[in-house]
Image (cartoon, rainbow, N blue to C red):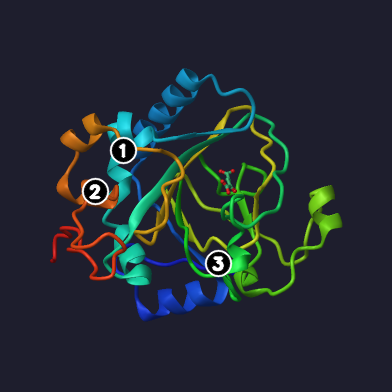
Amino acid sequence: MLNPVVAPGPLTDLDCFIFESWGYFVIPNVLSQDEVAACLAASQRIHEAAGTKGWGQVGRSYESEPDLERLIDHPAVLPKIRGLYGDRFILQSGWNTMQPAHGGMGGWHQDGSGAFDFKKLGYPIPLLQLRASYLLTDQSQPRMGNMEMIPGSHRTPVPLPADIRKEKGDVSIGHVICAPAGSVLVFHNAVWHRTYAHDGDYDRYTMHLIYSPPWLEPSDRLQNSQEFLQRTTPLRRALMGEFSRPDAPYGAGYEAPPFDDN
Ligand SMILES: O=C(O)CCC(=O)C(=O)O
C-alpha cells in the first residue's frame, strides 16, 4: 500500500513534492503514548461538557485543555506548516471531533466555507485551510474511524459525482489512512475526504488544528478568550492572530510571530 509518510520537523523538498502531488502527508508517532492518553482524556472531558451526542465537533478546546493547547505549535508539525505557508499564518480554528462507537461512513467533502465557496476563488482551489489532524485513538487498520482521502483530488476541476456523494459510495482511488494513535495527517482544504466507518465499541477522537493566511476570519471563535491569551505563550498568542499591524489591510505586512529561530 502506498503511503505518503514523512519524518517530523522541517518540510523537506521531498515532503513538499509529496504534499503538492497528493495534497497530504502523514507524520507517524508524533505524540508519545502518555501524550496521547492525556489528549484523549482532555477530548473526552470537553465532549462530555459539550454534551456531544453522536458524531460531533467542539471548537476552542485548546483554550481550556493545556495538553491540546501544546499541539498548536508542536515542533514535529509546525515547521511543516511554516514550510508550506512561510512565517505569517494563524490558527484559524481547532475542532476536536468525536465519532461514536460503531459510527458509520461520513459524507465526502472538501473543506471550506459555506458562506463563500473556495471554488469561487479560482482553479486550482488555493491553500487556505491547512489541517493537522492528530489521531488520538488507534487507526492502524481500516474501519477504525480513519480519514479516507482521494489523493491528488485538490487539483481536480470536476466535482465528485453527486450520486456517489449521496450514497456515500466507495471510490476506487480512495485511500484509507492507517496510522497509530499519536500520528498526524496534514492536508490541503481542497482534497476530497470523508470519515471512514468505525467498527470499535469505543468512541474515536481526533484533534484537528487548521492554519490559514492571517486575513482569513477564525471559524471556531468570534473573539479570542482574554484569559487564554494572558496565560499562553507569545508564539501561541501571535498564532491566535494577536499581533499589531502597521496598517489595517495588511499592506505593509506585520512582525512575524516569535518563532524560536527568528
Ligand atoms: O474527524 C473526522 O472524522 C473528520 C472531520 C472532517 O472531515 C472535517 O471536519 O472536515
**Circle 1 SS class:** loop
Tell me: residue 58, above or below residue 242: above
Locate residue 187, reporting x and y percent: 50, 61
Residue 242 numbered tag: 2
Residue 224 numbered tag: 1
The front one of 234 and 52 is 234
Classify residue 88 as left or right of residue 161.
Answer: left
What is the distance, in whole Å, between disc 3 and disc 1 at their CAs? 37 Å
* Comes first in the chain, label 3 or label 2: 3
- The quadrant holding residue 63 is top left
Q: Quadrant of the N terminus?
A: bottom right
Respond yes or no on whether mark 1 lies under 8 Å from ligand 1.
Answer: no
Tell me: residue 200, above or below residue 174: above
- Give the residue drawn at x 13%, y 66%: 262
Q: Classify 10 Å Cα crowding around label 2: few (below 14), some (14-19), many (20 and above).
A: some
Label 2 amino acid?
Answer: Glu
Task: Determine which residue is flagged by label 3.
Answer: 3
Locate residue 30, reporting x and y percent: 36, 52
Q: Check contact, mark 3 vs mark 2: CB within 8 A.
A: no
Label 3 amino acid?
Answer: Asn
Respond yes or no on whether mark 3 lies under 8 Å from ligand 1.
Answer: no
The front one of 143 and 76 is 76
For the view shown, which residue lies furthest in the front direction? 248
Q: Check contact, mark 2 vs mark 1: CB within 8 A.
A: yes
Q: Let me know if residue 1 appears in the view.
A: no
